[in-house]
Each structure stands twice: as C-alpha cells, then as structure tokens.
Image: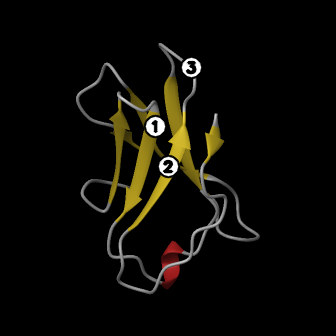
Amino acid sequence: LFLTKPVVAVTTGETVSIDCNLGTVTDRAAFWYKQIPGGVPQFVLYYHHSHSSPTYGTGFSSPKFTSTHQSTSDYLIYTVTKTSSLSTSAF
C-alpha cells in the first residue's frame, strides 16, 4: 500500500481526496486514521471492497468522510468534504 501524494494541502472549505494504491492486496480491509500533530491517532473508518459502504469510528460519518474503491485501478480514495482548520492532520 502507498499514498500517491504523501502531503496534500487545500484551502479551508475545499474537498480533499487522498488516493491509496492497494496494488495486489486483495480480500483485506483498509483502515483510515486521523492524527492531529502531537495527538494520538483516531479511527476514522475502514472499508472493504465487498461492503457497500465504510464502517465509521466514533465522531466520523458520511458525507463529511467517505471512502470508495476504484476497482479498475486498485485505488482506495479517501475524501474529506468541507475541510476546516480542524482537518489539519495526518491521515
């Protein structure tokens, strides 16, 4: 697994998508975590290609946070809509 862009910067209010290349990984779930600098990781969601939608951690929900799988390219796309200063984190 690897991120196509390790760092993504956007203006407050914009939508940001982070692509993760799954490569040859099959039959596994992908987990996304949010970590504010100096803080502990928070579980955001996990996504398995066989499920119709992600499973969310406490305080995270759709449509603010979502994840989709592009089966034709083996990419998992994580999206945060309407970013704010609270979105400044490592994912």
Q: Earlier in the sequence, mark 3 or mark 2?
A: 2
Disc 2 residue crowd, few under 14, some 14–19, many 20+, Cα 10 Å:
many
Task: Please say if the residues under marks 3 and 2 sit with CB atoms less than 8 Å apart.
Answer: no
Q: Is residue 47 above or below residue 40?
A: above
Task: Please say if the residues under marks 1 and 2 sit with CB atoms less than 8 Å apart.
Answer: yes
Mark 1 to mark 2 CA distance (whole Å): 6 Å
Q: Which residue is identified by label 1?
A: 75
Residue located 72% across and 71% down the image: 37
In this rendering, does residue 8 appear at all? Answer: yes
In this rendering, does residue 59 appear at all? Answer: no
Q: Is residue 81 above or below residue 75?
A: below
Q: Earlier in the sequence, mark 3 or mark 1?
A: 3
Marking on residue 19: 2
- In the rendered image, the quadrant that contains the C terminus is bottom right
Instruction: From the top left corner, tell me how far across and down residue 6 is, in percent.
Output: 66, 58
Instruction: From the top left corner, tell me how far across and down residue 74 is, in percent.
Output: 45, 30
Mark 3 to mark 2 CA distance (whole Å): 15 Å
Residue located 32% across and 76% down the image: 82
Q: Quadrant of residue 69?
A: top left
Instruction: From the top left corner, tell me how far across and down residue 17 is, in percent.
Output: 43, 59
Whether residue 41 sits left or right of residue 76 in the image: it is: right
Q: Amino acid at mark 1?
A: Tyr
Residue located 56% across and 19% down the image: 25
Q: Nearer the viewer, residue 70 or 64?
A: 70
- In the rendered image, the quadrant that contains the N terminus is top right
Please give the count of numbered marks on the rendered protein.
3
Q: Nearer the viewer, residue 58 or 33?
A: 33
Q: Which residue is identified by label 3?
A: 25
